[in-house]
Amino acid sequence: MPENLLEVNDLTVRYGLATALNAVSVRVEEGESVFVVGPNGAGKSTLLRAISGLERAAGGTIALGGESLKGLDPWTIAQRGIAHVPQNRRCFGPLTVEENLIMGAYRQPKPEVREGLESVYEVFPVLGEKRNQKSQQLSGGQQQMVVVGRALMAKARLIMLDEPSLGLAPMLVDNLGDTLRRIRNDLGTSILIVEQNVNLALGIGSRGYMLQSGRLIGEGEPAELRGRLREAYLGAG
C-alpha cells in the first residue's frame, strides 16, 4: 500500500484577524495526483503557500516523508523535495528556455543537469526545439511548459501547481492534462494541483479535496465530489 508523502494536519493560516485556512487536513501518497478545488477565496492558494513555507502557519502540522516542514524557510523546503509552480507562470523572461530549466537544477552536478534536460525535452518536445529562444517570446502554453519543466529539473518528490490552466486556450488545457498524467504515470512524481477548472482537476486527480471559506467541506474521488461542486459553484442541489 502506498505511503503518505505529504501530510497536512489541522493547518490554520491567518492574515491578521482574518482566518484564511481553518484546521484543514490533506494528504498525498507516493506517486499520487490529488486536486484541491473550490470557489474564489476558498484558501486554495494559501494552502500551497503554507506548505512551501511562503506563509507561516498559526496552527497544525506539515510533514514530507514523515519529517516536519513547519517553520522551515521556503528554500529549505524546496531542497527537501517540493517544487511549487505558482500562478501566472513566472518564467525568467530574458533567459532562454534552457537557462530557465537549468535554474531548477542549480544544486545538481552537470551530468545530472544534462540528463534532466533530456527528460524534460522528451516530455515537452517543443521546448527542445526552442531551447535557445528567450522565454518571454513564447506563447502562454509554452511558458507553462517551461515552469513545469523547471519543477521537473529540481527532481522534486512533489510538484504543487497553482491554477496551471489560467489563461490557456481549451486545446492547451487538454494538452496540460495529458502531460500531468504522463508525469504522474511515467515518472512517478506526486502532484498536488489547485484548479478553478473543475474538469481538468477531476481528470487529473484520483482523489481530492474541496475548500470553501477556508474550511474543508468535501473529500473523496472525483465522482463523489461532483455534486458538492455543483452546489458550491452554482448554488444548486
Image (cartoon, helix red, strand yellow):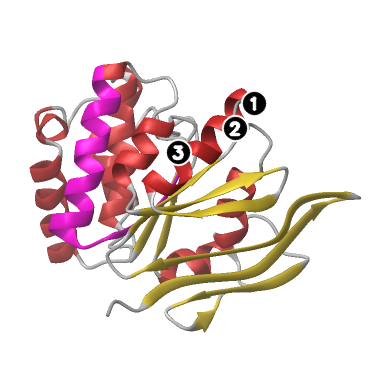
Q: Main secondary structure of the magenta part?
A: helix
Do the CB atoms of the residues marked 1 and 2 lie less than 8 Å apart?
Answer: yes
Span highlighted in magenta in the image: 171-194
Q: Position of residue 89 (x, y in %)?
A: 42, 33
Q: Which residue is drawn at 43% across and 48% down?
A: 224
Q: Look at mark 1 in the image and give the residue it sits on.
A: 235
Residue type (three-letter) at the residue carrying disc 2: Glu
Q: Which residue is drawn at 39% across and 73% down?
A: 5
Residue type (three-letter) at the residue carrying disc 3: Arg
**Observer able to see residue 71:** no
Residue nearest the observer in this picture, 128 or 187: 187
Asked if residue 4 lies left or right of residue 228, the reply is left
Residue type (three-letter) at the residue carrying disc 1: Gly
The numbered dot on residue 231 is: 2
Q: Look at mark 3 in the image and give the residue it sits on.
A: 226
Determine the secondary structure under disc 3: helix
Measured along the vertical axis of the image, is residue 12 above or below residue 47? below
Measured along the vertical axis of the image, is residue 65 above or below residue 149? below
Asked if residue 220 lies left or right of residue 186, the reply is right
